[in-house]
Amino acid sequence: MKHGTVKACLLVAGLWAGAACAQLPLAADRESVRALRVYRMTTQRMLVACSEAIAPRRGVRSAAEALHDYRGCAARALEDSGTRLEAVVRTLAAPDPVRALREYHLAFTRALTGLQPQPDERSSAYEERQAYLFHRLAHAWARFELADAATR
């Protein structure tokens, strides 16, 4: 490599590194990011756990037992996610991300409670309803990310 090319590469690398360092979160931002990650992982993990609790398993347990397991899971998920939501909200300064995160939580709550099959619901209708609820959940998260990015 020629000396001028090396200088240019170092300059570009330095500019990129400077921009990257400027993007490093401050201590308060790191707390917010950590709390947000924990909250999001909690909602995702609980949706999986509760959907497994309600899922039929041949010969292992009755529908009543599955429903009991699901309801216990959903109650724990709502309590835990609500606590974690409030921890994140305390770290956010702007009202728009807070509002968007609360809307995500509402979509999460609807997806969680929507895991319970309706009486006489066909499996195709159940799957369609689940797809709709999870689609809304993904959109709510995207709206939060946009609102949060606009304030940083």
Image: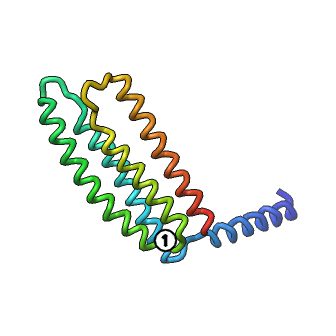
User: Is 140 left, or right, of 72 in this rendering?
Assistant: right
For disc 1, the marked residue is 92
- In the depicted structure, whether residue 105 falls above or below residue 22: above
Which is nearer the eye, 45 or 130?
Answer: 130
- In the depicted structure, whether residue 101 falls above or below residue 57: below
Question: Residue 61's x, y, as percent?
Answer: 12, 30
User: Is 69 left, or right, of 96 in this rendering?
Assistant: left
Q: Residue at x 28, y 32 (%)?
A: 118
Q: Residue at x 20, y 45 (%)?
A: 71
- Mark 1 closeness class: few <14, some 14–19, many ≥20 residues within 10 Å: many
Quadrant in the picture for residue 1: bottom right
Q: Secondary structure at mark 1?
A: loop
Q: Residue at x 59, y 57 (%)?
A: 146
Q: Residue at x 45, y 73 (%)?
A: 91
User: Is 12 left, or right, of 123 in this rendering?
Assistant: right
Q: Amino acid at mark 1?
A: Leu
Location of the C terminus (image quadrant): bottom right
- In the depicted structure, whether residue 119 falls above or below residue 67: above
